[in-house]
Image: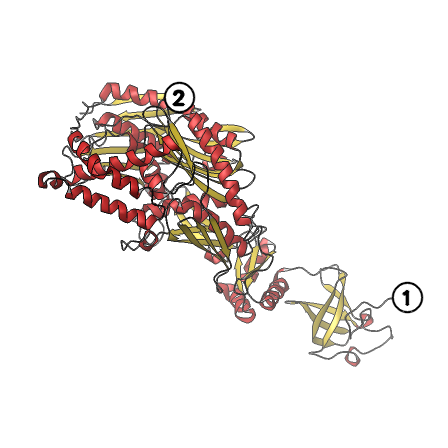
Amino acid sequence: MFDIIRKEVQWGDETLILESGRVARQADGAVLATLGETTVLAAVTFQKKPKPGIDFFPLTIHYQEKYYAAGKIPGGYLKREARPSDHETLTSRLIDRPLRPLFADGFRNETQVICTVLSHDLEHQPDMLAMVAASAALTISGAPFLGPIGGARVGFVNGEYTLNPSKDDLEDSKLDLIMAGTRDAVMMVESEASELSEEQMLGAVMFGHKAIQPVLDCIIDLAEACAKEPFEVEQDDNSALMTKARGIVEAPLRDAFSTLDKQERTSKVAAAKDTLIAGLTEEEAADSTAVSGVFKALEKEVVRGDIVKTGKRIDGRDLTTVRPIECHVGMLPRTHGSALFTRGETQALCVTTLGTGDDEQRIDALDGDRRERFLLHYNFPPYSVGEAGRFGPPGRREVGHGKLAWRALHAVLPAATDFPYTIRIVSEITESNGSSSMASVCGGSLSMMDAGVPLIRPVAGVAMGLILEKSGEFAVLTDILGDEDHLGDMDFKVAGTSEGITSLQMDIKVTGITEDIMKQALAQAHEGRNTILGEMSKALSEGRQEFSDYAPRIETLQIATDKIREVIGSGGKVIRGIVEESGAKVDINDEGIIKIASPDAESIAKAKKMIMAIAAEPEEGVIYEGKVVKVLDFGAFVNFFGPKDGLVHVSQMTNERGANPKDFVKEGDQVWVKLMGFDDRGKVRLGMKMVDQSTGKEIDPAG
């Protein structure tokens, strides 16, 4: 029944297994990839006829994690996997980015790749395995795919690069880098780093590229055994239309792309397209896909050719100049921190909100539940590009851009023990003309400093572009415009501090770039980043020392774990009473760490006093204020420490022999007592005569 083809290769310290022929046999290509006890199924299907009327490649990548893979049932009310999580969305984008440029030109057939995590051993991460499986499935499917690609995760521990580190290993790593590439070139990079140098980051990419070579060999071996015949792509011959169009609109396009203002330039480009359509015959204009393709090719020809030949860009800059920058902080009076970062025609309004442990995001993930105290949400409304368009929940782009900015800033956050706040940044993109994600990094850094977050160092980000001609000539562009991104060959984003890189992301539209190009891009990005950091420092160079009046103050206490139950009380009765009486917000975890939050310092102090009265232990030699609760013939019991009472013997009230305690105290009196110690049975012994009852100060025995 089954014609199973199975290939194995040693990959680092593990064995990678690729298998086809047993599962999903009606798909055009299906591969089971296994590493350790983690297994991912990738299934590829593509329509055999192109989708009519479109001028783009309709590829969709879906990565999905099934909870049964780790022996779990989904949390929450719905016990079935529902909409994709952010992690699944981000992984789908990771797989899409290196695959998309490798399909044959002119292929417009709807293509779908579905990657499903079937088994997860909680050690070998499934995202890179899914990328390998998708590449293998496409390679054997017969689709016009110019792969294969391989993907790998790279860590950096004790000065050494590590291949495919586990989640636990990453906790000690200064780097979490994901890369993908072909035999000869790098296609995609995504990373988070702890202020590593350009040389270290480039070394990590090249280490990963070397590490994927055995994977590529394994995929090729599998394809030689079971690949389908390649699908033939019919190439349209639009050379005559191209020649005619060049004569009609080359001059208007050159005029348009010499216009500095984005809105005016966009209008001129649209007018040029109308001019082209008007200059064509009715039959020529009827093929809108061909007309759009030719027009876009002419746009590229004009813009790219001028940049490579003259070194002058659309807005008049040279290759390395960053657009003018202006930064404002503290714009919004009721928010905890805010910043408006403007770079050319790109603008991000970033707002920071400080919260408590209750505000942490609880994540129900395949590899276990966890809580996240740093959140960054990116919004891209249509007005930011002067359009009226879709407005609704965040899409894949918004999730991806937000995560990139999150990675860039995460590395410089203070430790939770030093700054016990939940931090949420929202980046509202109010204008966009190139690299709004990097504007979110810059604005997010400033807004956190405005909120009083003690960052290790400020972070800035810059986007680099590339024009790579068939002749081998190339130009690396610093701080790219939207048109340069759209018409160029690379989007290379680098974020970091004055000391090193915290995040790097690279996407390309060609079949890969070389180490030399990456090295030049990193060098230019370093200079651009320092320029931006200098402009940011004019607004704010470090975190404010005072919080907003509307931000919560948080004080942290540590109590013994055996006191947690007493502080919480039966059914939460005690802790609710503390919250109600003090007005402060109180969080307590299983380790006995208590966070008390309130904008009012008196509320915090009151809650702290109430908690310590329950959880703390009295200390010998310390003076306490207490209340007389019972008077007997031989002394009085004083409630001096929360629920604790102690005996003050009459001999500790006065030096007079035969004295009556009732001559010194009565029930309800407030008195000062010193803890003298404990008797053989552990009972508390208190004294009053050595304490000045009016001041609470200890009386000097010497007089």
Q: Which percent across, then down, holds residue 401? A: 39, 45
Q: Residues within 10 Å of mark 2 (few under 14, many from 20)?
A: few
Query: Disc number at residue 154?
Result: none
Q: Is residue 630 visible?
A: yes
Residue located at (29% from left, 19% from top): 221
User: Is 702 located above or below residue 61 in the figure?
Assistant: below
Q: Earlier in the sequence, mark 2 or mark 1?
A: 2
What residue type is disc 1 on? Ala
Q: Nearer the viewer, residue 42 or 93?
A: 93
Q: Horizontal placement of 255 versus 107: left or right?
A: right
Q: Which percent across, then down, holds residue 14? A: 41, 25
Q: Is residue 165 visible?
A: no
What residue type is disc 2 on? Gln
Query: Disc number at residue 702?
Result: 1
| Residue identified by numbered label 2 | 10
Marks 2, 1: nearer the viewer: 2
| Mark 2–mark 1 CB contact (< 8 Å) | no
